[in-house]
Image (tube, rainbow, N blue to C red):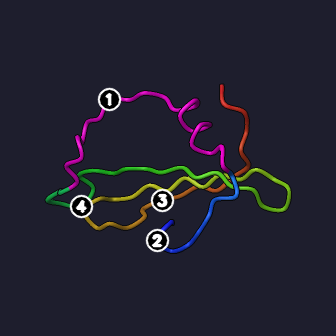
């Protein structure tokens, strides 16, 4: 973002992420090379505000094809 001259409007996003982050075992250990489709899927969740609502999008990505194989968009609720 810095290289492109972009700035975040949420300066506290990183601290909120660190606080809410759950610790999971790193099974891939940064080894993202796979030999066949559907061998490894990963996901990413992003939260944003739109029309005064908190929205999330979660994408499931097949690392072989480097394509989204599924996604969900919805209203963000409190984390339990």
Above or below, 37 against 28 in this view is below
Q: Secondary structure at mark 3?
A: strand
Q: Which residue is mark 1?
A: 25
Q: Nearer the viewer, residue 74 or 7?
A: 7
Label 4 neighbour load within 10 Å: few <14, some 14-19, many 20+: few
Q: Position of residue 33 (x, y in %)?
A: 18, 57
Residue at 27% in and 56% down = 38
Frontmost of labels 2 and 1 is: 2
Above or below, 80 against 68 in this view is above
Q: Which residue is mark 4?
A: 37
Q: Secondary structure at mark 1?
A: loop
Q: Secondary structure at mark 2?
A: loop
Q: Nearer the viewer, residue 55 or 73?
A: 55
Label 1 neighbour load within 10 Å: few <14, some 14-19, many 20+: few
State the CA–CA distance, disc 4 to disc 2. Answer: 34 Å
Q: Which of pointers 3 and 1 lies earlier in the amino acid sequence? A: 1
Residue at 50% in and 66% down = 2
Frontmost of labels 4 and 1 is: 1
Q: Secondary structure at mark 4?
A: loop
State the CA–CA distance, disc 2 to disc 3. Answer: 30 Å
Q: Which residue is mark 2?
A: 3
Frontmost of labels 4 and 2 is: 2
Q: Position of residue 49 (x, y in %)?
A: 75, 56
Q: Which residues are magenta?
A: 11-32
Q: Which of pointers 2 and 1 lies earlier in the amino acid sequence? A: 2
State the CA–CA distance, disc 3 to disc 1. Answer: 23 Å
- Which of the numbered marks, if any, corresponds to residue 70? 3
**Tag 2–tag 3 contact (CB < 8 Å):** no
Label 3 neighbour load within 10 Å: few <14, some 14-19, many 20+: few
């Amino acid at each position: 973002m810095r290289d492109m001259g972009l700035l975040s409007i949420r300066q506290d996003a990183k601290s909120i992420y660190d606080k809410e982050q759950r610790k999971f075992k790193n099974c891939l250990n940064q080894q993202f090379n796979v030999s066949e489709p559907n061998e490894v899927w990963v996901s990413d969740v992003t939260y944003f505000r739109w029309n005064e609502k908190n929205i999330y999008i979660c994408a499931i990505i097949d690392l072989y094809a480097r394509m989204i194989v599924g996604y969900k968009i919805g209203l963000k609720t409190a984390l339990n």
